[in-house]
Amino acid sequence: MRYGKLKIPASIISKLKYNAPTYDVSENYGRPGGFFGDYDERASGYKAVLIYIQNGLADYLPLFKNIARALFQIQEGCKRRYPLVVFGFGTTDYLQNDGKYFDFGYANDWYNDNKVAETMARISGSNRIVPAIIPELYPKPGTQNPYKGKSRIDREDLLVIIGKIDEIFFCEKFAERITYNLRKQILFIELDEIKNNVEFIYKPIVINSKLQNERILEAENISLNNFATSSASKQPLNSTSMKTIPEIEKDKGKSKGWPKNFEYLYDSDTATLRLELNSLNDIRKKNDLRKIDSWALAAREFLSNELNLKVDVLEVCINCTTEINTEIEALKRRLSFLRNNNDLNLVLIVNGSYVQLYTISELFIRPSNEIIRKDYEKRKSDPYHDKLEKDLQSFLFGNKKEIEDYTNERLAIFGEDFFDLKGKRIKIWREFPTGAFNNKINSDNRILATEYIDIVTLNKWKELSIIELKINDVKLEVISQSLNYALFIAAYWKQLKENFFADGVGYKKDSLDFICYIVSNKFHDRFYKICKYYQKNKVDIPIKFKPIILGYSLFNPKECD
């Protein structure tokens, strides 16, 4: 579906016209009748139309044209001149404008739809800003005001706010001052790239001001090739009120305790929990970056449920120079998923600079320059490796000489989801490679490191299934590792489908939904406490996690005596 074909529904146009303020006019259009024999009549229309558009939407010109036409239709009963003003917003603390406005209220306003749409595209620009902050609803006195006859929002104005879903926020300083009546004057137009749709909302919805940590307002889109940023771009971290957590400190480095490589800090004034990784030696171990998100959530659960401490903000800080940009990118994607899936106020800071996390659409719709491998080296059944996980993987894969031999019937040991698959001849891939690259596949262009998914196949309901095997390995970060795999599949599904799943794979439908199975004979004691963060909590998140315990007993054998 093209955005240019989407129009404001007739029902919303009718409501906006019905709710437009009415006023008396004469045949002189604005002069009251009386001495000169003029007669009075009633008219309806908004006193001003103010359009607020998120930065980076210049490519949506056809949609803007339809919006302009709808606004003229709403204002067709207006018999007084009115201004139409277009503002842009992103990270500036003021509304962006070119110092001009449209003077409308004439019979030929309809012919200006292209000019209004082009102005919207020009002011929005092509520079994507996320999160996009609306700092104010009208320029402050003393600043550039495109329409000198207006100094504030009037109760007879119509406000139109355009942006991508989950990316628009009101500045906290004035969000609480937006009254219920004012919210009734706002038409929200939200672009949803995941569903390839536009939602038109005209009702007094709750104003979104969840960016309460003002430091996030200063977030920058930092290049992955320049994490050691200059001091000019760094935002100082106020750690004077941050204190260590004694209950965690006493168990650091102990069995069933907390990893010793992290600093666990808490600020009671702002209810902020921070995990820091400070050592250069530690940062070069990729496992430390793979485990920091799972242990940050474990610490959040510990403070909330065992220490009864409030946690409003969760900060993950990497405080050392590193060249492992692929692991930083993987961490950024995991944190982006966790923030969007759970509405967490979650922040990533690298070397003192705030790293802007991805939105849902950015996480799952990747730029065209990002490519993956197009070939897969078919694995045959290997001899046993004297390592339990590899032995189990080899057994599950079976003795496959040719592609026609592919079947996943041995996965029946994982339970109901793979029950009775004998003879179904469902494909199974072993040690399926991940990894993403910038335009060309070589080590210098890596975006994501290459890892290997133990098994990729379908379950008995023909749902795409990725399986991670762990035997006698109870590390908590297994869920972070599995999330890396899941986000890879979700982000590059289109390329994967074309290269690997185009013929005969038999998946149930063309949707993105799939299941990530984590199979182990024992999970970490804190695994189930943080598992809720990784489960599918949002409709537009295509990933589902399912742990499977090997050798699990439903009853105590002693009860059978």
Image (cartoon, rainbow, N blue to C red):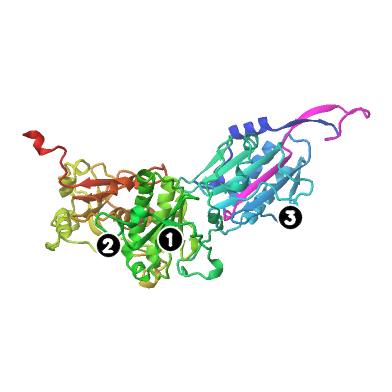
Marks 1, 3: nearer the viewer: 1
Q: Hey, what amino acid is under mark 2?
A: Tyr
**Left or right, residue 361 beside residue 90:** left
Residue at x 34%, y 70% (from the top left corner): 281
Marks 2, 3: nearer the viewer: 3
Q: Earlier in the sequence, mark 1 or mark 3?
A: 3
* Percent position of residue 524, x then y: 25, 51
**Is residue 109 one of those drawn in magenta?**
no
Q: Hey, what amino acid is under mark 1?
A: Cys
Disc 1, disc 3: CB below 8 Å?
no
Q: Hey, what amino acid is under mark 3?
A: Gln
**Mark 3 residue element:** loop
Say which mark, if any, is on residue 376: 2
**Left or right, residue 43 beside residue 529:** right
Find the distance from the CA under tag 2 to the CA under tag 3: 59 Å
Residue at x 60%, y 44% (from the top left corner): 175
Say which mark, if any, is on residue 317: 1
**Left or right, residue 188 beside residue 296:** right
- Quadrant where the image shows the C terminus: top left
Disc 2, disc 1: CB below 8 Å?
no
Find disc 3 in the rendering and name its residue: 144
Within 10 Å of disc 1 (Cα), the crowding (few <14, some 14-19, many 20+) is many
**Left or right, residue 297 beside residue 385:** right
**Is residue 54 one of those drawn in magenta?**
yes
* Percent position of residue 365, x then y: 44, 54
Q: Earlier in the sequence, mark 2 or mark 1?
A: 1
Looking at the picture, tell me which residue is in the foreground, 552 or 186.
552
Q: Can you see residue 510?
A: no
Find the distance from the CA under tag 1 to the CA under tag 3: 39 Å
Range drawn in magenta: 30-58
**Mark 2 residue element:** loop
